[in-house]
Image (cartoon, rainbow, N blue to C red):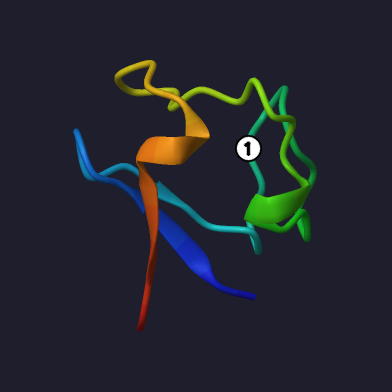
Amino acid sequence: MKKFRCTVCDYIYDPEKGEEGVAKPGTSFEDLPEDYECPECGVGKELFEEIDE
């Protein structure tokens, strides 16, 4: 599964880990709610970009 990085604060959403209170482990970025916000700086999904690792 691909990871996504917030372009504002560099927070990484890792689908392997999920995010407490938002998404259980194994939830892809695409399956996050449309109103998802970065837990670090509060911007929306549109300001995240896919990263290669």
Which quadrant of the figure contains the N terminus?
bottom right
Q: Percent position (x, y) of residue 14? A: 53, 57
Q: Percent position (x, y) of residue 43? A: 37, 22
> What amino acid does circle 1 point to?
Glu
Q: Nearer the viewer, residue 17 or 6?
A: 6
- Left or right placement of residue 38 versus residue 35 in this view: left
| Residue at position x 78%, y 60% in the image | 26
| Residue at position x 30%, y 19% in the image | 41
Q: Residue lying at the far front in this picture: please name it.
A: 46
Q: Quadrant of residue 6?
A: top left
| Residue at position x 23%, y 44% in the image | 7
Which quadrant of the figure contains the C terminus?
bottom left
Q: In this view, does 50 lie above or below 8?
A: below
Q: Is residue 21 above or below residue 7?
A: above
| Residue at position x 77%, y 54% in the image | 27
- Left or right placement of residue 18 versus residue 39 in this view: right
Instruction: Give the SS element for disc 1.
Output: loop
Q: Percent position (x, y) of residue 52? A: 36, 81
- Badge 1 is on which residue? 19
- Left or right placement of residue 15 versus residue 46 in this view: right
